[in-house]
């Protein structure tokens, strides 16, 4: 593996008596697509929420190695600082701003850059700032991602009125507008038809090609096996496999976790 | 067939009306000569009302069919027409507002009414930032109005500061209280936020009422200095140093009223201008994004607390400006002017106008405040008329008069967004 972008060490998340993620360690490579898979309830989304700052882990370290910056320990940051540190995410159930247009959605993603250019609001109200130029640049970036996600003609339509597949793509475009070093996708292919899944796979490969590393949770094994450089498998909150797609596909523990073990079936019968 | 259906509907309506109006209207208790309560029957009044409901429902169903009137949040035909006119309507309103004092036949009564309406327009626009844009339900907005009014009154009374010095101070103090309230409260959401802001409004009023040594308690503060025209006082003496004397005019009490009118117009327009500008800027967009989805905002790196606080502080500041104006106009304030009903009226203006819509709020304030004044002759009935009007608007247009949202930026043409898609905020 190349240098890591994300390093997770001994990550544990407990909710009361329930341990959702138990002492998980893995690394996501810089410029790679790392897939996080596992049966339902394996703790994938919990781990995801720890990485993106929505949960504070009970124990363990999550370290982001953004190129050209000092390593950041994400578990110590406040929720909104994670995005500034260079981690963007999408949600399993899409969370766009439905009453705002696609373009507005992409501009909100660039809020921090734009806000700094307005002189914290006061300068912009008076019209005395670098804001117009900053906004032009922001609109250019938004247009680039609208084009990349094939949404250009929907730029002025409210996000809530877009069809499901387009909403998924818009959410990825919005996450990319924060200029992340690591893009975290929670089941991006859920609910997509095969053609849309193919488009998504191509989009993710393009994003990787531009130097953004990707961490994704996905149930669509076709997509996972085709585009991932590395696959991490969780089951019942424990890491059971970590390797290339080919290695993981042949792993006995993984097959057992997905298909169920003989003994367990006997025991539960 | 249709007649049968209409008759059935009308009878049901009349029955419901009878259930309501017989106890409410037909039976009336009066205090008799000896101080005892006597029951008076008003069967004819109740019968008229029930008859009106019957005929109204019958006509409605016959004319438009049973489903003729449907609630709608989208841009109806007349909204579209209004929006097309909007480019003309807003400047037209503004032009009328600007020349109002010069229109023949506009006497002091109309100017006073204009000042009252504009005060509520300004308060509505101020609250619109908090409720309409940021989606934070604030039931205690009147607290900031009170802070502004008392700031001016006390600063003028104890330190002899002039209105023009106190106006920004009143705004800053109100914003400060907004932030102070905001810090502990903004982690609450929806109903809980509403209740705590309601309590805050009451606390401010109760403190003003009981801190007699500072605020005069229920007696209020009187003799608050009137504003001067950039140092020239309005005085009936017409001496050298007064407004009338300086401009060589006949001294008249109307001068001050006209001045106050333009002052509140300028303050209201300032509120509007700042809001319109901020809506097209990252801060305003972040407010609207917060209203739509707070969790997504956090994932995009927006500091939710700070963004909410700015909305709260800015809304409070404009409330404070309006409060200072109120104090200087009345020359007397007491806690009685800052009861919960004021908050409720301002919120009603914002909700009726359409959350987030500037022109909608202005129209709602004009109708709600101006209307109640104009129909004063109807006495107690005007409240019934307005209650009814509000119910009708909310049934037919649940998102207010202007229920659509205009995008803040567009590559092509800006198209109004259906209110159905726009979030209402959860605190």
Image (cartoon, rainbow, N blue to C red):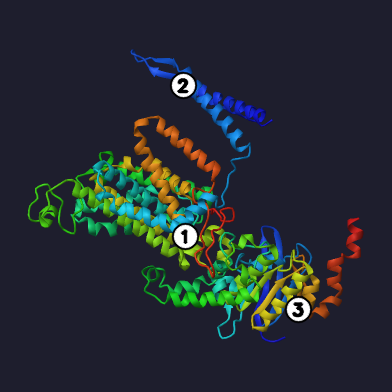
Q: Is B112 left, or right, of B32 in this rendering? A: left
> Disc 3: which chain?
A
Q: Is residue B41 above or below residue A123?
A: above
Q: Is B202 left, or right, of A76 in this rendering? A: left
Q: Which residue is mark 3?
A: A227
Q: Nearer the viewer, mark 3 or mark 2?
A: 2
The N terminus of chain A appears in which quarter of the rendering? bottom right
Residue closest to the far left: B240
Query: Do tags 3 and 2 sit on the same chain?
Result: no
Q: Is residue B151 visible?
A: no
Q: Which residue is mark 1?
A: B308
* Residue B135 vs residue A218, the one in the foreground: B135
Give the CA distance from mark 1 to mark 3.
41 Å
Q: Is B245 left, or right, of B1 in this rendering? A: left
Answer with the quarter of the image where residue B107 lies.
top left
Q: Residue at x 61, y 40 (%)?
A: B68
Q: Is B40 left, or right, of B163 in this rendering? A: right
> Disc 1: which chain?
B
């Amino acid at each position: 593996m190349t240098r890591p972008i994300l390093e997770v060490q001994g990550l544990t998340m407990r909710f009361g008596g329930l341990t959702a993620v138990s002492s998980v360690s893995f690394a996501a490579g810089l410029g790679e697509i790392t897939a996080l898979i596992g049966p339902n309830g394996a703790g994938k989304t919990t781990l995801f929420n720890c990485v993106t700052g929505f949960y504070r882990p009970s124990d363990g370290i999550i370290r982001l190695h953004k190129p050209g910056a000092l390593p950041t320990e994400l578990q110590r940051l406040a929720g909104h600082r994670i995005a500034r540190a260079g981690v963007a995410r999408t949600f399993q159930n899409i969370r766009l701003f439905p009453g705002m247009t696609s373009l507005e959605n992409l501009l909100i993603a660039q809020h921090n850059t734009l806000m700094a250019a307005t002189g914290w609001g006061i300068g912009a109200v008076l019209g005395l700032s670098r804001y117009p130029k900053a906004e032009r640049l922001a609109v250019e970036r938004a247009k680039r991602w609208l084009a990349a996600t094939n949404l250009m003609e929907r730029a002025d339509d409210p996000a809530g009125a877009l069809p499901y597949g387009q909403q998924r793509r818009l959410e990825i475009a919005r996450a990319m507008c924060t200029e992340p070093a690591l893009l975290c996708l929670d089941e991006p292919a859920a609910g997509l038809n095969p053609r849309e899944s193919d488009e998504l796979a191509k989009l993710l490969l393009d994003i990787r090609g531009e130097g953004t590393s990707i961490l994704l949770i996905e149930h669509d094994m076709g997509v996972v096996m085709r585009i991932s450089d590395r696959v991490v498998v969780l089951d019942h909150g424990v890491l059971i496999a970590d390797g290339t797609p080919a290695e993981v596909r042949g792993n006995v523990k993984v097959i057992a976790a997905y298909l169920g073990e003989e003994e367990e079936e006997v025991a539960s019968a | 067939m249709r007649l049968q259906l209409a008759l059935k509907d009308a009878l049901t309506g009349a029955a419901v009306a009878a259930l309501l109006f017989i106890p409410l209207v037909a039976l009336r208790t009066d205090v008799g000569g000896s101080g005892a309560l006597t029951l008076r029957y008003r069967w004819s009044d109740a019968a008229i009302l029930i008859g009106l409901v019957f005929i109204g429902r019958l006509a409605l169903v016959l004319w438009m069919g049973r489903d003729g009137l449907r609630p709608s949040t989208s841009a109806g035909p007349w909204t579209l027409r209004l929006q097309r006119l909007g480019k003309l309507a807003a400047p037209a309103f503004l032009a009328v507002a600007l020349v109002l004092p010069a229109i023949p036949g506009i006497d002091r009564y109309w100017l006073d009414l204009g000042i009252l309406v504009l005060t509520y327009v300004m308060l509505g626009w101020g609250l619109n930032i908090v409720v309409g844009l940021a989606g934070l339900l604030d039931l205690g907005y009147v607290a900031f109005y009170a802070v502004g009014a008392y700031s001016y009154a006390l600063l003028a009374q104890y330190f002899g500061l002039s209105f023009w010095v106190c106006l920004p101070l009143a705004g800053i103090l109100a914003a400060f209280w907004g932030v102070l309230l905001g810090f502990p409260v903004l982690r609450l959401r929806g109903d809980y936020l509403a209740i705590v802001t309601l309590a805050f409004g009451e606390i401010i009023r109760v403190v003003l009422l009981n801190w007699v040594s500072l605020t005069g308690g229920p007696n209020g503060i009187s003799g608050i200095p009137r504003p001067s025209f950039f140092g020239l006082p309005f005085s009936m003496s017409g001496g050298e140093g007064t407004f009338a004397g300086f401009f060589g005019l006949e001294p008249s009490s109307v001068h001050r009223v006209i001045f106050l009118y333009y002052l509140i117009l300028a303050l209201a327009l300032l509120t509007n201008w700042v809001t319109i500008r901020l809506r097209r800027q990252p801060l305003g967009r972040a407010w609207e994004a917060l209203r739509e989805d707070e969790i997504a905002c956090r994932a995009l790196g927006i500091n939710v607390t700070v963004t909410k606080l700015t909305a709260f502080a800015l809304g409070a500041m404009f409330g404070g400006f309006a409060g200072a104006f109120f104090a200087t106009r009345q020359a007397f304030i007491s806690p009685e002017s800052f009861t919960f009903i004021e908050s409720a009226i301002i919120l009603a203006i914002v909700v009726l106008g359409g959350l987030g819509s500037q022109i909608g709020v202005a129209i709602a304030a004009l109708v709600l405040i101006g209307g109640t004044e104009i129909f004063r002759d109807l006495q107690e009935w005007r409240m019934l008329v307005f209650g009814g009007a509000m119910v009708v608007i909310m049934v037919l247009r649940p998102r207010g008069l202007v229920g659509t949202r205009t995008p803040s930026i567009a590559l092509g043409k800006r198209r109004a967004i259906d209110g159905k898609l726009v979030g209402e905020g959860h605190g």
